[in-house]
């Protein structure tokens, strides 16, 4: 599975302050109500109008027509919860409000619309080389929105609107506990009435980051950026908006920026949970594992709970301490009560078990996650991978088809493509090509939303795309950060370009921390063999298969073939 650091668990509670015996302060809603009341009518109407103008782009039926809109969205156009993405971390959100107060259309959640959109996207994938990059980005935009306009039909009433109290708008915690789309609609309605409520602008920005992550829609990120900027214009230095900017930067894979914003938020409020968690994420993704471990201890001292526990566990896993990682996640699961928390932590346990080749255990954890939230995409993806590794390829294919039909993201697209290739039935090669083409389309859409997608691009292109582009992307990512994941990506990109002597130091660095990852071990084994060290090659290929014999439908098969050849040469 992809790295786990840029996803997010739902927030535990709304209070980011240290325990205090001071009198209860006035609520944000009341404070902002006073501020709004003191504003002249023209000013309030002006801000509300500014909010209403910021509507997301629509995805038109024509690729060229929609492509123009996508380009415009790219030009104009959170998460203390879960650790920051690739896993998933991180997916693609309207500081100004949609004119109708909606976060999406009713059709967005219609499975029939999504299936039809994915079929159109697959047809487009077969013509990939003839399409302009912008057109491909729009193909994916249509798939992401289920063939619907990104923001359109109004959502009158509903639980989200009802949940807005007279004192103010929804908090991030309220959003995590309820319907995100309805909550965003409620925030939009509130901000049209109270456009100077800086706290609600901050919450809206964070909600867009979360919506981008859960829907795989990078177009939400520019919207999140504008909402958070508006919050800071109204209340310079407020820690919630700074923490939101940190989460947004992490979701866009700007980890130096995420660290800077988190530090600024913590200077204002050392107990801000989102900032504490995003700081750990940023340090992990920058490869500063000792600093990340210290940051996790600090966060646990200040704000112990599910978001911090999951990050602490991942830091331990990256150092090879699987036992501690599992114990911490089990503690987190035991303390989780909200369904979103249960689903997230159980999925993390499933991924940890899958990494160790414990497929039955992994499937049990995924079952628990899906019992809490039967639509939780990381659990659906993880279950499919575990099914494939267990030999139930039919169930795995069906599961991944279900995932990518809703949200076509790079990880499940590549996994599904490889399953098609491994199955080898009539038409499977073309189906696999469709999945890989959509990875390129997602990359274009992500970049239009301000996301640095070089790591995703390098990993996919090295095996299923343009090898020179894979190397370019891997080098660019390595120049930005030195993590085990970027080291492995650069090593493999160098290998597929025939530069194994250059690749070997990076392959060794990727396996140096003790992180138990079969893909890394496989890559090192192949590179050791290419440089002439057959003994080391046998050691690492065997280690990969001993650890997780089903780590990849194609990679595991190639590892077994290479190991057999090496054994025959002894």
Image (cartoon, rainbow, N blue to C red):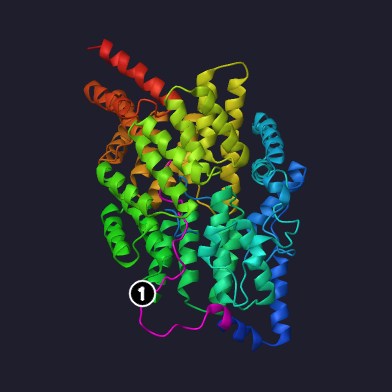
Question: Which image quadrant for residue 564?
Answer: top left
Q: What residue is shown at x 36% (from left), y 22% (from top)?
A: 559
Task: Give the residue at mark 1.
Answer: 18
Q: What residue is shown at x 64% (from left), y 83% (from top)?
A: 36
Residue 42 versus residue 122 in the image, above or below = below
Residue 383 versus residue 423 in the image, above or below = below
Q: Which residues are magenta?
A: 2-30
The magenta stretch spans residue 28: yes
Q: How many marks?
A: 1
Point out residue 135 in the picture as x, y percentages from the top left corner.
69, 42
The magenta stretch spans residue 346: no
Is residue 513 visible in the rendered image? The answer is no
Q: What residue is shown at x 52% (from left), y 80% (from top)?
A: 27
Classed neighbour count for the residue bearing mark 1: other residues with Cα under 10 Å, few (<14), some (14–19), many (≥20)? few
Is residue 530 visible in the rendered image? The answer is yes
Q: Secondary structure at mark 1?
A: loop
Q: Could you tell me which quadrant the N terminus lies in?
A: top left
Question: Which image quadrant for residue 182?
Answer: bottom right
The answer to whether residue 558 is left or right of residue 525 is right
Point out residue 535 in the picture as x, y percentages from the top left corner.
22, 22
Q: Could you tell me which quadrant the C terminus lies in?
A: top left
Point out residue 78 in the picture as x, y percentages from the top left corner.
50, 59
Question: Could you tell me what secondary structure mostly forms the magenta stretch?
Answer: loop
Point out residue 120 in the picture as x, y percentages from the top left corner.
71, 35
Residue 519 versus residue 90 in the image, above or below = above
In the foreground, 423 or 285: 423
In the foreground, 136 or 261: 261
């Amino acid at each position: 599975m992809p790295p786990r650091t840029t996803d997010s668990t739902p927030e535990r509670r709304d209070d980011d302050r240290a325990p205090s015996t001071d009198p209860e302060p006035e609520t944000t809603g009341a404070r902002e109500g006073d501020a709004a009341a003191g504003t002249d009518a023209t000013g309030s109407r002006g801000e509300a109008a500014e909010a209403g103008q910021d509507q997301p782009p629509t995805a038109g039926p024509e690729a060229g027509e929609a492509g123009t809109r996508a380009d415009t969205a790219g030009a104009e156009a959170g998460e203390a919860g879960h650790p920051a993405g690739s896993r998933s971390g991180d997916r693609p959100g309207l500081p100004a409000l949609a004119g109708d107060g909606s976060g999406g259309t009713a059709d967005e959640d219609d499975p029939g619309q999504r299936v039809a959109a994915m079929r159109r996207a697959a047809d487009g994938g077969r013509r990939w080389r003839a399409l302009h990059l912008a057109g491909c980005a729009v193909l994916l935009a249509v798939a992401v929105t289920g063939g619907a306009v990104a923001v359109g039909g109004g959502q009158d009433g509903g639980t989200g609107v009802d949940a807005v109290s007279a004192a103010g708008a929804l908090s991030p915690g309220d959003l995590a506990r309820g319907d995100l789309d309805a909550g965003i609609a409620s925030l939009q309605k509130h901000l049209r009435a109270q456009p100077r409520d800086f706290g609600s602008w901050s919450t809206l920005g964070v909600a867009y980051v979360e919506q981008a992550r859960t829907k795989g829609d990078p177009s939400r990120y520019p919207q999140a950026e504008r909402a958070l900027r508006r919050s800071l214009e109204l209340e310079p230095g407020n820690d919630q908006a700074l923490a939101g900017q940190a989460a947004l930067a992490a979701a866009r894979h700007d980890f130096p920026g995420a660290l800077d914003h988190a530090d600024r938020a913590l200077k204002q409020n050392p107990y801000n949970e989102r900032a504490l968690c995003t700081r750990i994420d940023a340090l992990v993704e920058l490869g500063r594992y000792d600093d990340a471990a210290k940051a996790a201890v600090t966060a646990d001292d200040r704000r112990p709970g599910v978001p911090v526990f999951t990050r602490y566990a991942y830091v331990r896993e990256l150092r090879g301490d699987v036992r501690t990682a599992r114990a911490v996640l089990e503690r987190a699961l035991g303390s989780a009560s909200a369904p979103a928390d249960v689903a997230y932590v159980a999925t993390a346990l499933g991924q940890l078990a899958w990494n160790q080749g414990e497929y039955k255990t992994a499937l049990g954890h995924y079952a628990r996650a899906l019992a809490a939230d039967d639509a939780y995409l990381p659990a659906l993806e993880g279950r499919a991978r575990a099914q494939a590794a267990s030999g139930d390829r039919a169930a795995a294919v069906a599961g991944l088809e279900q995932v990518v039909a809703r949200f076509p993201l790079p990880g499940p697209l590549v996994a599904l493509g490889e399953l098609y290739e491994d199955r080898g039935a009539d038409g499977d090669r073309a189906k696999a090509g469709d999945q890989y083409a959509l990875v390129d389309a997602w990359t274009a859409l992500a970049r239009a939303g301000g996301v640095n997608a070089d790591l995703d691009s390098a990993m996919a292109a090295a095996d299923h795309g343009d090898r020179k582009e894979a190397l370019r992307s891997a080098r660019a990512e390595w120049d930005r950060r030195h993590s085990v994941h970027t080291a492995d990506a650069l090593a493999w990109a160098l290998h597929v370009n025939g530069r194994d002597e250059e690749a070997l130091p990076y392959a060794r660095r990727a396996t140096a921390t003790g992180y138990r990852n079969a893909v890394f071990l496989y890559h090192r084994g192949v590179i050791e063999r290419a440089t002439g060290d057959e003994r080391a090659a046998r050691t690492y290929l065997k280690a990969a298969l001993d650890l997780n014999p089903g780590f990849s439908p194609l990679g595991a098969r190639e590892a077994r073939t290479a190991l057999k050849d090496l054994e025959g040469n002894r």
